[in-house]
Image (spheres, rainbow, N blue to C red):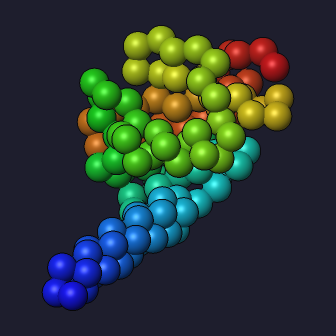
Amino acid sequence: MIKQRRMIRVMVMVVGIFLVCGAGCFFLFEPSVKGFPVPRTGVVLGTPDGLNIKTRLVSETDGPGLLYAARIRQAGWEVVDREGLTAWYQKDGRLVELTTFDDELLLEPAERAGIEQ
């Protein structure tokens, strides 16, 4: 009886953790440039061509972090090309350029970056 209660508590905690993580994945990001998800937890600095966002979800060496990369894939964006710090994503014929630095990202429409649609 005691083992069964403990097992139920563990299962409830596991399900709760998954629900919180899943909700966080949706509510931590919002669509921005051409519907591409951007973090809500960062400081947004507008540029003439796109967005410059200061956030801890990206790095220069790893690109978008695990949570951010999962949200990008969940939103339907696919990596078209990658060169150095920059990756180009495509969805429904729309292209965006994501450049990641340490704790900072730059998001621009791809036609501004010289990529032909």
Residue at 31% over, 28% down: 62
Location of the C terminus by quadrant is top right
Above or below residue 52? Residue 31 is: below
- Residue 13 vertical position relative to residue 93 in the rendered view, above or below: below
- In-image side of 8 versus 30 (left or right): left
Which residue is more in the foreground, 100 or 111? 100
Foreground residue among 85 and 51: 85
Q: Quadrant of residue 36?
A: top right
Residue at image point 49% right, 43% down: 70
Q: Is residue 45 above or below residue 48?
A: below
Where is residue 110? Give x, y as percent. 68, 26
The residue located at (78%, 15%) in the rendering is 116
* Residue 33 seen by the camera: no
Residue 9: quarter of image: bottom left
94 relative to 68 in the view: left or right? right
The answer, for residue 12, to whether it is visible in the render is yes
Query: Is 75 placed left or right of 65 in the picture?
Result: right
Instruction: Give the vertical position of 90 relative to 18 (above or below).
Output: above
For the view shown, which residue lies furthest in the left direction? 2
Residue 26's x, y, as percent?
A: 54, 63
Q: Position of residue 48 (x, y in %)?
A: 61, 42
Residue 86: x, y in percent?
A: 48, 22
